[in-house]
Image: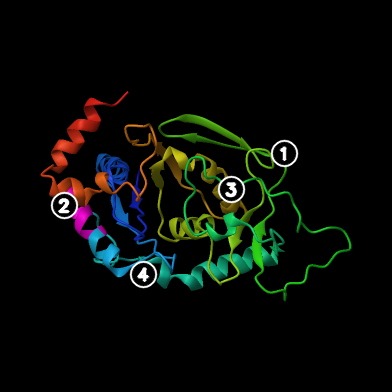
Amino acid sequence: MRGYRGRLAPSPTGFLHLGHARTFWIAQQRAQTNGGTLVLRNEDLDRDRSKPEFVTAMLEDLRWFGLQWQEGPDLGGPYAPYSQSQRLDLYRGAFEKLRSAGFVYPCVCSRQNVLRALQAPHPGEDEPIYPGTCRPKAGVVADTKTARVNWRFQVPDGETISFADGNLGQQEFVAGRDFGDFVVWRHDGLPSYQLAVIVDDAAMAITEVVRGEDLLKSTARQLLLYKALGLTAPRFYHCPLVTDEAGIRLAKRHAPLSLRNLRAKGLTPQNMREAWTKNAP
């Protein structure tokens, strides 16, 4: 992996938890093993939930856990800015390219998944397959002046999207069966998670994306976007998820397992790393 570039991409919508820490630690290990660069990106597009205090806590918790990055919102770097809220022009340019090439279409459906489009999907919360209500039909011209228009990427139904995951091996998903047309641009002028991350990873020259295995299906969607935009996709490495005692994937609502709560209880980063190494399958 010559010229390796990895990244940490937390969202400041709450306190980081043990699951974030393990995935980020793996990302750092892979960057160090390959003699590469680790980039910190602040994914703060959610205007309602992203808070300055969470950004401060995020930086503090990452450093406390032993994570070190060479580029980021606090350090700068050749691909600045490193906060998504300051990169909207890049996302708009990518969206306009998709629109001019006919890859996206306007959608006026009011669906809950549109509201969640800024966030990475979670297990059991992946958006339902869109029924195609607003898909372009022969002879029908969509009214793009309609209020609250969201733009969807039209997936190539029946096409198999495959990739070799660095941890889980060969993966395959079928467009139109495993996932449907997905939102890339919201009516409030913001890109979806799916569009923003691929634009940033390409612009920041990321060579490998390390993240949780709950995002495997998102990778298939994003590979379609890379292809449509003529961008080179990075490699992918999906990590096992950290779960609670009930087997439920950790989320920011799991306050007892947040890094700051565990720290307050006297646990050290070394304690945590030893625990998950011991309990690894």
The reply to whether dot 2 and dot 4 touch (C-beta < 8 Å) is no
Tell me the CA gap for discs 4 and 3: 30 Å
Q: Nearer the viewer, residue 108 or 76?
A: 108
In the rendered structure, which disc, 4 or 3, sits on the residue that comes first in sequence?
A: 4
Mark 1 or 4 closer to N-term? 4
On residue 64, which mark appears?
2
In the image, taking residue 180 as reference, residue 162 lies left or right, namely left
Q: Mark 1 points at which residue?
A: 158
Q: Quadrant of residue 86?
A: bottom left
Q: What residue type is labelled 3?
A: Glu
Magenta span covers which residues?
Answer: 58-66
Residue at the spot 41% in from the left edge and 66% down from the top edge: 84
- C-alpha span from label 3 to label 1: 18 Å
Q: In which quadrant of the rendered image does the N terminus lie?
A: top left
In the structure shown, which secondary structural element does the residue marked by tag 1 occupy?
loop
- Depth check: 149 or 84 in front? 149
Q: Are marks 1 and 2 in contact (CB under 8 Å)?
A: no
Q: Residues within 10 Å of mark 1 (few under 14, many from 20)?
A: few
Q: Which residue lies furthest to the top in this view?
A: 281
